[in-house]
Amino acid sequence: MRIATYNVEWFASLFDAQDRLIEDDQSSGRWNVTRARQTAALGTVFRALDADAIMVVEAPDAGRKHSTVTALEHFAARFDLRAREAVMGFANDTQQEIALLYDPDMMTAIHDPQGNSSGRDGARGAPRFDGSLLIDLDIDATEDRVVFSKPPIELAVTTRSGFAFRMIGAHLKSKAPHGARNDAHAMQIAIANRRKQLAQAIWLRARIDAHLADETPLMLLGDLNDGPGLDAFENLFGRSSVEIVLGAEGAYPLFDPHAARALGQRLAAMPTTSRFWIAPEKRFLQALLDYIMVCPRLRAKSPRWRIWHPLDDPTCWGDVELREALIAASDHFPVTLDIDL
């Protein structure tokens, strides 16, 4: 069985008011890429993946005028994908939803959020992801309220063979220091925002601990927007969001080989899953942001990970159509896990 995670940049911009694909020559939102070109590129990538399930990060918008599920299912029908049914979790107001596109012949997937409702006042521990967490962010003996701008999705999944496990899809993000009056104020805002991101990672880790304490097999997929060597805040806080979520020193560790490699050899070349153009420096920045982390029980099932990086993966590089599609489709590249479930 193949499971994937894929952050699709500007996916929402490819759909009209009826959640149908717009395949024209207008800009898709990606630089110098039309909506028709990005749509075709995504079709090529999704067909090449041929995955049983894809956790779509930055999925099309949900709300009064749009349906994430409808848009994804229209996309799947357009390209005749096996993964043709969609399920999403809690909607957010960023036009970047988290949803699973899956093959109903191979599995069932149900949004099944866990944790107590926190109410308006928030709660400690691991409340439901659409609530708020009470946690002291800055060691001032005062609890702060933390919320997810993009609440993680919790799924109960059962394969055709009857194997039941949990999936959590996540998109952690530290907001840019908007409204800063000067460099010092920008740094103050950035540090506060990073504290909130780390608190979200702690919240996510608490939910993981709860599932694994119940001996429920679990995998976490998505874009954690953080990792070893990514920025200057790592030394300030000691641990990245990735390290917190992995929980390597706890009772219930998760594993991702790309994260393990990056954490284990910080001065050497590391895997990357994204490629961004840095205009002031006139160069591309590559970073490891996307992960599929598994619990020990799933790790024992012969998993094989792959980053579909068009410049690093020889098979992707050798297939010119796929290589160009991966570059045009998104600023992130898919990560897949082949596993015997």
Image (cartoon, grey):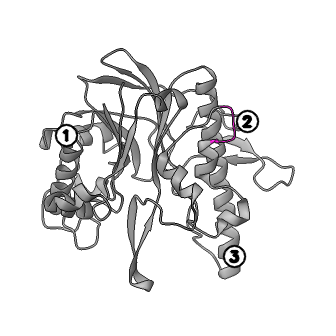
Q: Earlier in the sequence, mark 2 or mark 3?
A: 2
Q: Residues within 10 Å of mark 3 (few under 14, many from 20)?
A: few
Front residue of 104 and 249: 249
Q: Which residues are magenta?
A: 247-251
Choose top left, top right, bottom left or bottom right for residue 129.
Answer: top right
Q: Is residue 230 magenta?
A: no
Q: Residue furthest top?
A: 162
Q: Amino acid at mark 2?
A: Arg
Tell me the tag on residue 182. none
- Pointer 2: what residue? 124
Q: CA distance from mark 3 to mark 1?
A: 45 Å
- Pointer 3: what residue? 185
Instruction: Estimate the x, y position of residue 211 in percent, counting from the top left.
Output: 58, 26
Secondary structure mostly seen in the magenta stretch: loop
- Pointer 1: what residue? 76
Please give left or right for residue 286 compared with residue 181 in the image: left
Residue 39 in view? yes
In the image, residue 109 above or below residue 191: above
Instruction: Estimate the x, y position of residue 65 in percent, counting from the top left.
Output: 31, 45
Q: Is residue 248 magenta?
A: yes
Choose top left, top right, bottom left or bottom right for residue 75.
Answer: top left
Q: Earlier in the sequence, mark 2 or mark 1?
A: 1
Q: Amino acid at mark 1?
A: Ala
Query: Residue drawn 58% across and 50% down?
Result: 242
Query: Residue drawn 78% across and 48% down?
Result: 136
Instruction: Estimate the x, y position of residue 204 in percent, counting from the top left.
Output: 60, 40
Local SS, label 2? loop
Q: Residues within 10 Å of mark 2 (few under 14, many from 20)?
A: few
